[in-house]
Amino acid sequence: MPRCRWCASAPEFFEYHDREWGFPVGEDQRLFEKLCLESFQSGLSWRTILAKRENFRAAFHGFDFRVVATFTEEDVLRLLADPGIVRHRGKIEAVINNARRACELVEAEGSLAAYVWRFEPKPEDLGEPQTQSTSAASVALSKDLKKRGWAFVGPTTVYAFMQAMGLINDHVLGCVQRPMAEAARQAFRRPA
């Protein structure tokens, strides 16, 4: 079956592509996880991050941002010694910082999902699928997150997050999953 070309580069990508990528997500914890994993991917391949995803989940308590927000320097040292994750001090500290900012954001906005989905672009404002690495919406979300004190959330990282979490349907034309992702987006109730 025809799929987006990128998923053919590694066998583990097929499941991720067919079941997750581009399908809308409205759960705060999953949204936070994906933002963190996209931050960890910066400068690395997604294959590396996907292979370590379960290790990341264990190390960061399932990306429960309320728990991660309580992490201390001892936790940073523990994580830097964990061979199952990417051991980059700046990225680890960014996750902890961003967990604290997520708690503040939920307090101010009601939920991370309601906040993030306000930045969903109109399909007509996007180019052809998989032809860009940023968009006006990813730039706006990145800028707003940074203004709120988030780290490692540049426009390219945020655009990859938006692709993966279904804020845009970036499956290529002809991909077997494109109509399925679009149907899921149509049925998805945007968080308010």
Image (tube, rainbow, N blue to C red):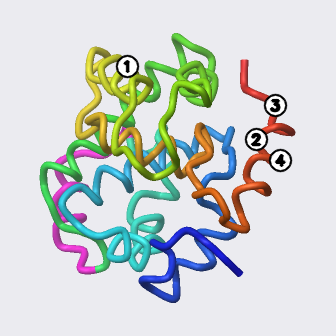
Asked whether, in this view, residue 178 is left or right of residue 122, the answer is right
The residue type indicated by label 4 comes to Ala
Q: Position of residue 138 (x, y in %)?
A: 40, 30
The magenta segment is 69-83
Distance between mark 4 and mark 2 Cα atoms = 5 Å
Q: Please determine whether, in this image, residue 76 is positioned above or below residue 64.
A: below
Q: How many marks?
A: 4
The residue type indicated by label 3 comes to Arg
Q: Which residue is mark 1?
A: 140
- Disc 3 + disc 2, Cβ < 8 Å: no
The residue type indicated by label 2 comes to Arg
Nearest the eye: 176 or 99: 176
* Residue found at x 62% / y 52%: 22
Q: Residues within 10 Å of mark 4 (few under 14, many from 20)?
A: few
Q: Position of residue 17 (x, y in %)?
A: 60, 69
The residue mark sitting in front, 1 or 4, is: 4
Q: Which residue is mark 3?
A: 189
Residue 185's label in the rendered image is 2
**Sequence-wise, which precedes: disc 1 or disc 4?**
1
